[in-house]
Image (tube, rainbow, N blue to C red):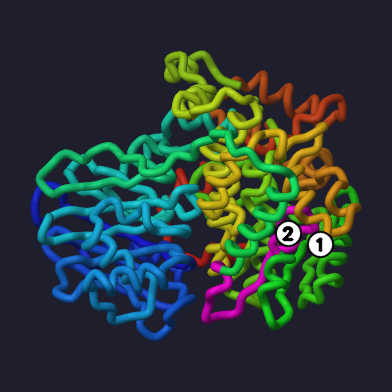
Amino acid sequence: MCGIVGILDTRGTREVSRELLSRMNESQHHRGPDAGAMHVEPGLGFGHRRLSIIDLATGQQPMFNEDGSVVVIYNGEIYNYQSLITELTQLGHTFRTRSDTEVIIHGWEAWGARCVERFRGMFAFALWDRNRATLFLARDRLGVKPLHYALLPDGTFVFGSELKSLLAHPGLPRNVDPCAVEEYFALGYVPEPRTIFTGAKKLPPGHTLTVRRGAAVSEPVEYWNPQFTLERKIGVEEATSELSHRLEESVRLRLISEVPLGAFLSGGVDSSAVVTAMASASVEPVNTCSIAFADPAFDESRYAAQVAERYRTRHFVDRVESEDFDLVDALARVYDEPFADSSAIPTYRVCQLARRHVTVALSGDGGDENFGGYRRYRLYTDAFKAKLDGYKAIEVFRRHARSATVDDPVALAQYLDLKTYLVGDINTKVDRASMAHSLEVREPLMDHPLVEWLASLPSSLKVREGEGKWLLKKAMEPRLSHELLYRPKMGFAVPLARWFRGPLRRRVHDALLGERLADTGFFNRDVLEELVAQHQSGRRDYSAPLWTLLMFDAFLRNVADRPIEVQSLTQAA
């Protein structure tokens, strides 16, 4: 896993500052502590931080083709790279490394922009083709790996894995986007293609972006969109058998590593299913990592222990105390923009635990969206409402719904989750929390052939008689206990309501009713006072909006109000 940054002069060949490029690159040091390198030529600069996973000896980046006319920087894993090496070699291409990075170079030479259609995995990459004066950016189908970009007023195009790398450039405007604020308070995150700042964007999942020197920057081009056809005729027995086979194949592909590897094990259905597949494919015991909560209402570690014992894993458990709320400021620096999913706290901690034992961890993320698992939804001054000009965050869903090809309500909900919540919340949460600890996380339940196959199945195989993830649970019945499979879903939650009436009572009051939020001019103080008073008195549970506001305040203090500095993201944790 890695971090990438770049600078391109779209108007000519102005000199790129190596010092500035280095500052942008080092802002993401945590994404790749093993090595760092840069490439600078007239009008172009590429920077790369490397977390070495595959081809430790010869996989350094930036990487070039034979004559140096094509250079690539890349973050991610292409799991079918070995078969692609064989295919590209037969087409006459010569490989000098054993890395998946070189597949991108020769894939571009052989297939051009359509090379992304051949890649199976998680990736965000940038490729410069000097002969065509073309910069090509791409992001994986489900947005597992991030990619941010901006066109600055002077014609400079900048990009990077994390928003902090763009904020390290002094030319990036830091104006907060009112529509992004509306989306954040409705959804708990800022969805693609927006960022919290008007001057920067996220490349949407399943899209590429081509930037040609001397030409206007084009709009991103979509190369993948899941089609929920629901038309496959298949019986339950055949479906469970094929699902088991596909899951095992997806997991097996993600076991390729030259460094220690393990898995997150929450005790839920998704992570437990992944661990069972790993155990069947591994000769050595699987390394598993779990979080135990001091508050029994949030603790499911006994179910994780049950799976670990059944499959004889090397099981590591870290206990999260119920007062583990000191991460608020650290999380604001990790995510770069307001992010209100409170499960980022235990996610951060389990990544911290896992990195003490492994460099790569498999997760069960994507199970709820693909198999039919959940649901959720929403304070402003008149002046801020005027800035919105009638815009509401529901437009995010309407925009995606126009691209859906299905009327079935369950399938439509799954499609919208894949396009919004999975990308903007789940994948963002896991990528930033894991990379803050230099840990690579792989998601076998987001393997795009598996996603496409599941999208072809009727919804009755996913949700039946009120039971979500029905097919996955049926497939796992021979491998996991009935108690684990069919117990009520807990989620990865923290006791916010109690925190805000106890140890965080003063902090919430000072943050929400202090000068910083008031100075934005966004919020109605009377409403904020009512939220705080009603919750802290115990009359109402407003923990969700209070946490959302608290994290917005943390964003203002830690990101918007200060320059991005090269620092350890984990130093405060």
Q: Tell me where the magenta segment starts and ends, as one range.
A: 253-274
Magenta stretch: includes residue 254? yes
Residue beneath the point at 58% across and 34% down: 231
Circles 1 and 2: CB atoms closer than 8 Å:
yes
484 with respect to 215 (left or right) = right
Magenta stretch: includes residue 19? no
According to the picture, the residue beneath numbered tag 2 turns out to be 273
Residue 137 in the image: state x and y as whole percent: 30, 52
Residue 451 in the image: state x and y as whole percent: 56, 47
According to the picture, the residue beneath numbered tag 1 turns out to be 479
Mark 2, secondary structure of its residue: helix
Residue 322 in the image: state x and y as whole percent: 82, 54
| Vertical order, 186 against 566 (above or below) | above
Q: Nearer the viewer, residue 90 or 472?
A: 90
Mark 1, secondary structure of its residue: loop
| Vertical order, 380 against 441 (above or below) | above
